[in-house]
Amino acid sequence: MSLRSRLIGLVCLMLMASLVLDGVIAYANASRSVRTEMRAAFLVGRQTITSALDRVGNAADLPGALDELVASFKGNRHLRVWHVGAGAAFAAPVSEKSRFGRPPTWFVRLIAVIPDTEQIPVVVGNRDLGALVVATDPQNEILEVWNEFAESLVMLILLGTLTIGLIYVFIGHTLRPLDGLAAGLEEVGGGDYRIRIGGRLAPELARLRDNFNRMAARLAEAAAENRRLNERLLTLQEEERSELARDLHDEVSPYLFAIGADAATTSRLIDQGRTGDAAEHISSISDAVRHMQRQVRRMLARLRPIGLVEFGLREAVENLVAFWRRRGRRSATR
């Protein structure tokens, strides 16, 4: 999983955790707030009705006065009031509108506010005029809580979407130089050490860029040195071949010719019975063979330093260096 996906996933988890925590807090506050509001509205409504009944006792038109009392509760957000008896007056809260629609059933059940209801008898003198019923209606209060919860949810979603978008853009912009670095590493892996990374970067990426550029420069220097050493090695090999060819031609070939000539003469002298004369030629052959052996040993010493086996790498290299120094001085004096 990419770094961008991990950060976005982490932000989503944080938003979900915030949503759950906000929901728990909202539920606790909303349930308590609705109950408190309903209880306060119920007590105020009951007190209002009780006080009003004491005043309307001397009214000439008691049914009309009761109807006016019930009608005075129209517009109340939390109470239903109606007359049970001879009259049919009824006052109920007007359902308020919501920007987010009606609260869902699960939300209403979650608040779980049971309405308070009470009948207040209306008895004036000896006349029984029924009762006034006052009951709480939490619909508008639950709707208000739902609006607050929905607003918080929408704001959280908008904030989360904006945050995720900013992370996506910012991380993409920040990681884009890493794509150039990866391409540069591929170029370096392919043997092209001329690649360099430039541009303004964050301090952390700038250090990475500078280290990469230094590495590429050092690799370029090492590659140039290797080419120079390879060219020098090829030159030395060519010089060695020329030297060996010259030694074979100047030192070994004449003696081989002399050995062949002496061998032919010796064979002829022996056939003629002149063994004394043949001995001189055999001695010449032995001298030529010893000379060639010395020459071949010298040639083999140049081809395979014996000191490497006998004395180790360090002394063998020192002997080889001394040999080429002597050879260089001889070449300079010619």
Image (spheres, rainbow, N blue to C red):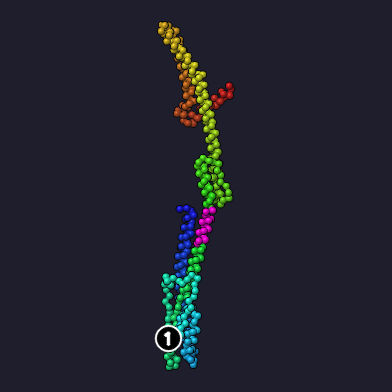
Q: Residue at x 46, y 12 (%)?
A: 261
Quick one: 123 or 36, which is closer to the camera? Answer: 123
Q: Main secondary structure of the magenta part?
A: helix
Residue 123 magenta: no
Image quadrant containing the C terminus? top right
Q: Residue at x 45, y 53 (%)?
A: 1
Q: Is residue 53 above or below residue 103?
A: below
Q: Is residue 170 left or right of residue 281?
A: right
Q: Residue at x 49, y 93 (%)?
A: 60
> Residue 322 location in percent, x, y?
53, 27
Mark 1 nearby-residue class (10 Å; few <14, some 14–19, many ≥20) = some
Q: Is residue 69 above or below residue 253?
A: below
Residue 36 seen in the figure = no
Query: What segment carries the magenta color?
Result: 160-173
Residue 16 seen in the figure = yes
> Residue 91 location in percent, x, y?
47, 82
Q: Is residue 223 above or below residue 255?
A: below
Residue corresponding to mark 1 = 84
Q: Residue at x 48, y 89 (%)?
A: 64
- As shown in the figure, which amino acid type bears the numbered disc 1? Val
The image shows a total of numbered marks equal to 1
> Residue 78 location in percent, x, y?
47, 78
The residue most toward the top is 273
- Badge 1 marks a residue whose secondary structure is strand
> Residue 296 location in percent, x, y?
47, 21
